[in-house]
Amino acid sequence: MPITTPPSPSALPPVLPASFYGRPADEVAPALLGQLLVVRHDGELRAGRIVETEAYLCEADLACHAARGRTRRTSTLYGPPGTAYVYLVYGMHELFNAVCQPEGEPHAVLVRAVELLAAPEGARGDGPGRLTRALGISRADDARSLTRPPLSIHAGAPVADVRVTRRVGVGYAGVWADAPLRFLDSASGAVSRPPAHAIGSGRRA
DNA sequence: CGCTGGATTCGA
DNA sequence: CGAATCCAGCGC
């Protein structure tokens, strides 16, 4: 695969306005597919095309970090739409979310995979922990606005076909574990894992 | 103040 | 399949 030239800041498509995020996360999540996640990291531009997302809905959603109410870590989730929610999991991976809904309603969209457009040689974007490392996103970006540098999301080409599955890694969430809240660009190979019914190497033909 | 377990990834 | 690696959240 050819490496795409880093886009120059002036050539970037328009930024998605905060109003784009001011609706339920299960609407924003599929709408974010195909959009461009852009990071200015140490003066260098990094970017990826979003190809996989998950929606986390509210305090009732047992998989959402806000399920146990507002705490120090989750206070960002209650902030205004169009801000970043970045947190550490498993002691080593930083995961990037876009906060949705009006301020006070803890909705967020987790970005699980991007096709890298501008990133360090050898970096990978297929996985929520990998893409933050590739783009240089960290907890320092938590609560930052997504409508201006150094962290922004810009309009990209629409995605023709969206595939929907249950979310990954939330088996503890009771009935919410099976909710169809994971969205993938079915034309992209750069997803964090294959869709559920394609999992299993022992398929008979 | 100590204990538990992750919205994951990598290597054996 | 388990280690890596750390801190939020909760219980005492």
Image (cartoon, coloured by chain):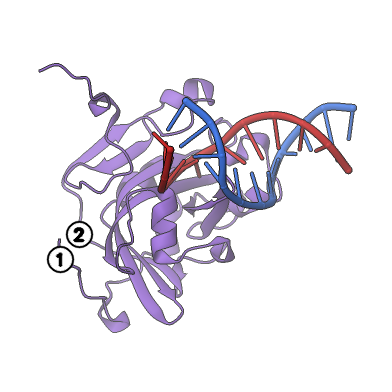
Chain colours: A purple, B red, C blue
Quadrant location, the C terminus of chain A: top left
Give the farthest residue toward the top: A204
Give residue A65's position: percent from left, percent from top. Answer: 59, 40
Which residue is labeled 2 in the image? A157
Q: Are marks 1 and 2 on the same chain?
A: yes
Quadrant location, the N terminus of chain A: bottom left
**Given the image, what chain letter belongs to the residue carrying mark 1?**
A
- Using a 10 Å C-alpha cutoff, classify the residue at mark 2 as few (fewer than 14 neighbours), some (14 to 19) or many (20 or more): few
The quarter of the picture where residue A16 lies is: bottom left
Q: Amino acid at mark 2?
A: Ala
**Given the image, what chain letter belongs to the residue carrying mark 2?**
A
First in residue order: circle 1 vs circle 2: 1
| Residue drawn 29% across the image and 83% down it | A10
Front one among A146 and A194: A194
Which residue is labeled 1 in the image? A2
| Residue drawn 56% across the image and 30% down it | A62
Whether A173 is drawn above or below A194: the answer is above
For mark 1, give the secondary structure: loop
Whether A60 is drawn above or below A116: the answer is above
Front one among A80 and C12: C12
Q: Is residue A205 left or right of residue A18?
A: left
Give residue A133's position: percent from left, percent from top. Answer: 44, 60
Answer yes or no: is residue A111 visible: no
Give residue A46's position: percent from left, percent from top. Answer: 35, 71
For mark 2, give the secondary structure: loop
Label for residue A202?
A: none
| Residue drawn 46% across the image and 74% down it | A150
Give residue A160's position: percent from left, percent from top. Answer: 16, 47
- Using a 10 Å C-alpha cutoff, classify the residue at mark 1 as few (fewer than 14 neighbours), some (14 to 19) or many (20 or more): few
Q: Amino acid at mark 1?
A: Pro
Q: Is residue A82 left or right of residue A35?
A: right
